[in-house]
Image (cartoon, rainbow, N blue to C red):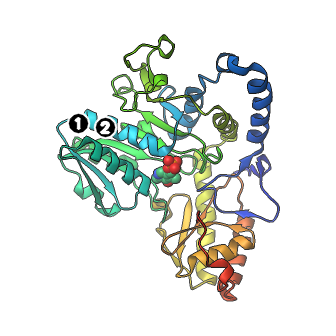
Amino acid sequence: MPLKKELFNLPDGVIYLDGNSLGPLPKAAKNRVASMMQDEWGTQLIKGWNSAGWMAQPSRVGDAVGRLIGAPSGTTVMGDTLSVKVFQALAAALKMRPDRKVILSDSGNFPTDLYMAQGLIQMLGSGYELRVVAPEAVADTIDDSIAAVMLTQVDYRTGRMHDMKTLTELAHSGGAVMIWDLAHSAGAVPVDVAGCGCEFAVGCTYKYLNGGPGAPAFIYARQDLADSVEPALAGWLGHDAPFAFDLDYRPAPGIERMRVGTPPVIQLTALEAALEVWEAVDMSEIRAASVALQEAFIHEVEARVPALTLASPRNSAERGSQVSFRFEHGYAAMQALIARGVIGDFRAPDIMRFGFTPLYIDKGDVLAAVDHIETVMRDRLWDDPAFMTRQRVT
Ligand SMILES: *Cc1c(COP(=O)(O)O)cnc(C)c1O
């Protein structure tokens, strides 16, 4: 796969293994945002909503994201944060199964997904329940009491990956609505939301899609449902005719009804430019290159750094695009690595996480990173008070 390193703003001396958490700055995004500020906002002022196409941006960018996750045009829209999109999908799913009260999820899910479910059912009252089981137990827990199965395909801590097609089929055979969170999948692994048949998919765009800190999230609804989904967040820009200023809500046709309020145009502009990098990219090539990098990394770390234990599945088919190792002093070790220019991150209690993004990481980077890991561990460079104080973001 041809590297696209030259398309990114990567500081000298840095090996960036954290694109699974915040993708680096695409040069095109930087330039596009600068020109948008000057030529659109700065010049066209409020006319930009029409003349610069700002109002159509959430669906236009939604289609660009859709191409990377197997969503047909017109089924994906951008806006808000992933937490909000999880809430929207869940609320819509529960409406579709009024005689059922259980949301099923797993303990590998990202906390905000579970919190949003908890908040929603608290608001609904009347017997709703969030059932959280081990990831391996999901398949056997699906029964005809479940209204919605809500899962994140790739576990943020370990990279363990669910089989979307099999679990969606199981959910459907139990009569449940299937919601997939693709936060660690979009731009990382080939995804086919339409092919797997799930009702909803959601995800963020600041991780593998490089949309920048705070980039808006996406929501997909299956084509046959888009006109019947009942939006719980009935915002004016999801209305059929926002500028009629009706006093009563009437949802827009199709996926536009999942819009809420005014779109974040500057962030969407950055994201739209960032997505151009993907136009000439084949996700199966990205996947193959990612697996090759991960396998090389695991092999070298296990051979040279025995203190680290693999926390990710060993079988690459069951792993997303990250590799995690456990180490008791993982936080300090990661800080020591970051000080040497190898940027990964840490997830409590003891996980050192490394993301593999073949657009801008190659085998040479992987081998150089392992050299640093070996040095940090062999010389106990992590054992330094400077690396022990936890910062707000780990
Ligand atoms: C990163 C991530 C989030 C973050 O949600 P925001 O609302 O964008 O902060 C949510 N869920 C999962 C599964 C994630 O990986």
Q: Across the whole image, how many numbered discs are drawn on residues?
A: 2
Q: Nearer the viewer, residue 364 or 381?
A: 381
Q: Residues within 10 Å of mark 2 (few under 14, many from 20)?
A: many
The kind of residue on which mark 2 rests is Ala
Query: Which residue matches tag 1?
Result: 97
The kind of residue on which mark 1 rests is Arg
Kind of element beneath mark 1: loop
The answer to whether 107 appears left or right of 7 in the picture is left
Tag 1–tag 2 contact (CB < 8 Å): yes
- Residue 185 in view (yes/no): no
Residue at 76%, 64% in the rendered image = 14
Residue 190 against residue 138 in the figure, above or below: above
Residue 75 against residue 11 in the figure, above or below: above
Q: Is mark 1 within 8 Å of ligand 1?
A: no
Q: Nearer the viewer, residue 326 or 240?
A: 240
Kind of element beneath mark 2: helix
Q: Quadrant of residue 258?
A: top left
The answer to whether 136 appears left or right of 84 in the picture is left
Residue at 61%, 82% in the rendered image = 303
Q: Residues within 10 Å of mark 1 (few under 14, many from 20)?
A: some
Work out how far the residue at label 1 is from the one at label 2, CA to CA, in angstroms. Answer: 7 Å
Query: Which residue matches tag 2?
Result: 93
Q: Residue furthest top?
A: 244
Residue at 42%, 35% in the rendered image = 194
Residue at 64%, 83% in the rendered image = 304
Q: Nearer the viewer, residue 252 or 66?
A: 252
Q: Residue furthest front?
A: 247
